[in-house]
Amino acid sequence: MPYEWTKKPNSQTSEQLDLWPFSSLPHRGFASFIMTTFVLITLPLYVLIGTILFWALLPFLMITVGAIYFAIRKNFRDRSIIERLTLDAEQFHLLRQEANGDQKDWECNAYWARVHMHETGGPVPHYVTLSGNGREVEIGAFLTEDERVELFSELKARFDDYRNRLT
């Protein structure tokens, strides 16, 4: 799953949830894919070596390989989103780092924080939001539908646990 719960160091009650988009193509696989694409796309050219047709087709095939390379690199950059939810004894804090480096923060008293699931009506099915301190923010919109359902149940249980500790 593209999220992980960890205990914060030097703390008995503080936890941290890190979420990130799933990456099905690792960097090593990316290099193999580009090399395989290059070999397969230039395969018809090998019989044309030494002819004028070779030089006529080569730039278009290289532009195609370059376009595939840059499209996949852009996809890697766009998936570099990280969400970090910190659950402390009295305060919950969500930090979202966008792919372009911008950061968005949300903070709320642990007692008033609530987690909601909007099964329909959100940008994605089973849309999970956190509310409190007069704001409602999304969390894990890049997860799959099943992962969002599981995340919701885990967050609800942990939020209730923290709320019960405060009373």
Image: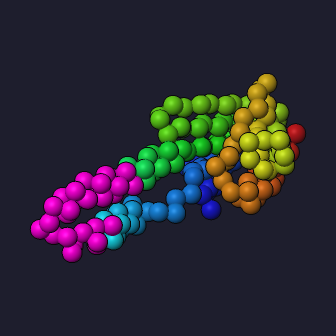
Q: Give, as a single range, the part of the protein colored magenta.
A: 41-69
Viewer-side residue, 82 vs 28 = 28
* Magenta residues, dominant SS class: helix
List x then y, in percent, for residue 58: 24, 59
Left or right, 147 with respect to 111, comes to left
Residue 94 visible at all: yes
List x then y, in percent, for residue 44: 29, 72
Q: From this viewpoint, which residue is outermost toward the top?
A: 134
List x then y, in percent, for residue 164: 86, 45
Say which residue appears at 83% left-offset and 33% top-offset: 112
Viewer-side residue, 146 vs 13 = 146
Q: From this viewpoint, which residue is outermost toward the left?
A: 50
Viewer-side residue, 21 vs 105 = 21
As displayed, is residue 162 above or below residue 68? Answer: above
Say which residue appears at 74% left-offset and 47% top-offset: 124
Residue 69 visible at all: no
Q: Quadrant of the C terminus?
A: top right
Say which residue appears at 11% left-offset and 68% top-offset: 50
As displayed, is residue 16 above or below residue 150? Answer: above
Q: Quadrant of the N terminus?
A: bottom right
Q: From this viewpoint, which residue is outermost toward the front?
A: 52
Left or right, 99 with respect to 167, comes to left
List x then y, in percent, for residue 109: 76, 31
Q: Does the magenta portion include 53?
A: yes
Q: Quadrant of residue 105?
A: top right
Left or right, 93 with respect to 44, comes to right
Q: Does the magenta portion include 87?
A: no
Viewer-side residue, 106 vs 33 = 33
Left or right, 76 with respect to 61, comes to right
Say which residue appears at 35% left-offset and 63% top-offset: 34
